[in-house]
Image (spheres, helix red, strand yellow):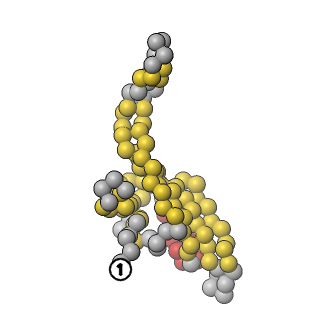
């Protein structure tokens, strides 16, 4: 049985993640809020903005690649969409990048990397 490819960045398949969480949110205009009558008015500008939190256990070479992606202003991300159960492409950026040494080895360690991908 083959594994699902959850993430790819700029056409390169990423390793199987330890955790993978997709959040869809709406962007609201400043004109929304509570009315004088006490009801909530939402002025939705955009729906379904994707935020993906992922973590990986990776080798030093993958740590280097992921750090390079973090330093880019924009990246093309193919991600497993939980609504359609298919891969969807979108432009994103990386935020909250963390790298932690899990185990020291003769090959420069096993690293735990986590970050959040945010859609433009």
Determine the residue positioned at 51% across, 57% down: 53
Quickly name the residue at label 1. 1
**Residue 12 spot, x, y in % from top left:** 39, 71
Q: Secondary structure at mark 1?
A: loop
Residue located farthest toward the right when viewing the structure as drawn: 104
**Residue 43 spot, x, y in % from top left:** 38, 27
**Residue 40 spot, x, y in % from top left:** 45, 23
User: Is 78 on the left-hand or right-hand side of 118?
Assistant: left
91, 43: nearer the viewer:
43
Compared with 44, 110 (above or below) is below
User: Is 116 on the left-hand or right-hand side of 108?
Assistant: left
84, 54: nearer the viewer:
84
**Residue 41 spot, x, y in % from top left:** 42, 23
Determine the residue positioned at 46% across, 72% down: 16
Which quadrant of the figure has residue 103? bottom right
Compared with 76, 50 (above or below) is above
Determine the residue positioned at 34% across, 53% down: 83
Determine the residue positioned at 44% across, 54% down: 22
């Amino acid at each position: 049985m083959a594994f699902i490819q959850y993430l790819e960045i700029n056409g390169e398949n990423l390793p199987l993640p330890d955790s993978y969480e997709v959040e869809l949110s709406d962007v609201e205009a400043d004109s929304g809020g509570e009315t004088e009558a006490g009801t909530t008015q939402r002025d939705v500008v955009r729906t379904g903005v994707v935020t993906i939190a992922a973590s990986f256990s990776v080798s030093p070479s993958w740590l280097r690649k992921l750090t390079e992606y973090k330093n880019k202003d924009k990246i093309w991300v193919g991600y497993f969409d939980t609504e359609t159960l298919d891969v969807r492409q979108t432009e994103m950026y990386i935020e909250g990048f963390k790298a932690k040494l899990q185990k020291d080895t003769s090959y420069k360690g096993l690293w735990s990397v986590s970050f959040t991908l945010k859609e433009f």
